[in-house]
Amino acid sequence: GPVGDPVEDHGDADAAVALQKLITPASSSSGRRWQTLLLVLGVAVAVAGLAVLRSAVVGDSKAPRDASPGRAASPAATGDIVVDVAAANGVWVQPNNFEPKPNVMIILADDLGIGDLPTYAGEDTVIRTPHIDRLAAGGVVLDRYYVQTSCSPSRAALMTGRYPLRYGLQNMIIGAKRPYSVFLNETFMTKSFQAAGYSTHAIGKWHLGFCSWEATPSFRGFDTYFGYLQGEVDYFSQVKKPYFDWHRQSRPNCGEDCMETVWRANGTYNVDLIRDETIAIIEGHDTSHGSPLFLYVTFENPHAPCGVTAEWVDMYKDSVSNSVRQIYAGLVTAMDDAIGRILATLQAKQMIDNTIILFSSDNGAPVYRYYPPGAPRAMTCDPEGTWAQDTGGTNYPYRGAKMTLYEGGVRAPGIIHYPPKLKAGARFDGLIHITDWYPTLLSATGVSDLAAPVRGAFPLDGIDLWNALVTLTPGRDSVLIDYDPETIGGGAMIQGNLKLYVGGPHKFGTWQFPPEVGIAKGWSMEEDPQSGAEDINCTDGCVLDIVNDPYEKGTPWPASPEIMDLWYRRTEEKVIPSLRVRFSEDSPWADSFAQAMGGVWWPYGCPDMGAPVV
């Protein structure tokens, strides 16, 4: 019958009776002897067949699922759980030395500034995040954690373990109508976890491309997906103008005949949607059979368009005077509350101590910037000229913001929590980059890299830092932050204590402090003692001591020939022959497909998903 249908088990005696009815009675004694012999043989075959069938049925419902039809399950995929054949009663037996693989949960905030978490900002913020604070108190806080400058590049780096400049995605997001995605020949880490028997689920924001079905989550290593494909939607209507965008993929490779539009999401706060789906997956997970979970939980908070319910805003009426900052603070605390409920569910299921939990932002907060009259404006949540910047966030005391190479744009909040191995309440001051999570999480869980056979052509830029995190010792000394001669005229790299800037001018390098801090210190916006700074502009390269001057207040000095030689060698290795940033015109098919689907964003076709290997 169909998978999941109940299978009746009448026992071996019933099987023999059923088999007897299939044999035509014989008229002679010889026939009866043959009949008896056939019956004995038939019963033996039936019993053996039923035992195999019972094992298969129980295995389908209890054992970790194979990641794709037709693929042989490896010992890792089955979690080394074996059937007690002698008992032949469907009871699973674990070896005495069985140790379940850790679950993995990645929680990604969107545009969360490092200055807006008490874990980092201390008294320089009034924003309340008690659950993230507790996660930090029980885990390791990352003090030199680097990401990319914006949404799609950081998510791509996380999933591939490779710098986005290798596939032309280093400095721009993937627009709704732009017909490209992360190249399909890039292997996402979830493929490795899926192949190892993990139950893999993505909930929330995708933003890694959806023009082709093969670019959507369930084709890239996720068993299920529930969320929105764009970079942002309205928090309540789930509309990315002018079309609706909330979908469910209920199985691997869930394409045109499978993906559902979740219309009921319209009118529900999407923080609640993401929270409830995550909780439902955890509550429904059977912890008895050794198939661990991989959860990729990606909130929209506190990204524009800044939607939040009144209960969260009201918390800040007395402590924050600026209305947009109140909304931003409410967005952060609403996300924190959802995280707290998810963690409580893990605790109730007795899973939290066997779950590696990573919390990260994808980039720094966008901060206030001046737009000349008539100039196009980025999406903002308040008119210019307020304390509240673009969304109300801040990266104080770090310089710069989202879409810049300054520390405020690329140094992000990060916390990793795993009680069995990681020291509670520790701070890790070693260098770490978002690409490192691919090899680090594989190492931490004992999962093999599915793309290992092609790593010669697709080398990882991430480094396995699991031992470094466990022992709190540095594991890498260099990060190529970005290189894009077309859109930013250069790039940046960290080598040891030095941060190298190349090209420029690098704009929007202000230090924008939280409004409540400014008020407490008696500053006006014009009197901000750190607001004015010259753009860094170094055609031939210049450096800062980023360890001793993390806020980039000092004057950079010319880079040495040695570090420039290293820069040229590293960038040539990764982008020569050059992969240009993948700007493209909007697809004429995007609107047509969305309208044909009744006003829903839908895959509409990618002209060319191939790419040179760099």
Image (cartoon, rainbow, N blue to C red):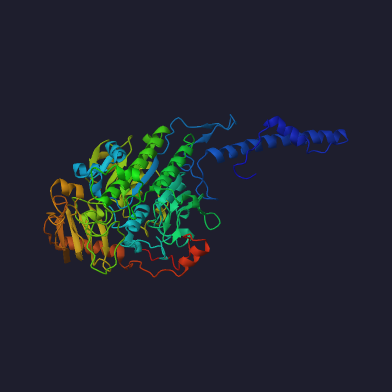
Residue 153 versus residue 105 in the image, above or below: below
**Between 252 and 28, which is closer to the camera in this rendering?**
252
Relative placement, left or right, of 571 versus 21 is: left
Question: How many badges with numbers are in the image?
Answer: 0
Report x, y in % for residue 522.
12, 48
Report x, y in % for residue 110.
33, 52
Report x, y in % for residue 468.
27, 43
Please identify the quarter of the rendering in which residue 469 is found. top left
**Between 522 and 244, which is closer to the camera in this rendering?**
522
**Between 515 and 81, which is closer to the camera in this rendering?**
515
Report x, y in % for residue 154.
32, 55
Point out the image quarter for the C terminus: bottom left
**Between 395 and 84, which is closer to the camera in this rendering?**
395
Does the image show residue 592? Answer: yes
Relative placement, left or right, of 540 versus 488 is: left
Point out the image quarter for the N terminus: top right
Q: Which residue sits furthest right?
A: 27
Relative placement, left or right, of 90 versus 478 is: right
Residue lying at 31% horizontally and 55% vertically, measured from the top left:
461
Does the image show residue 262? Answer: no
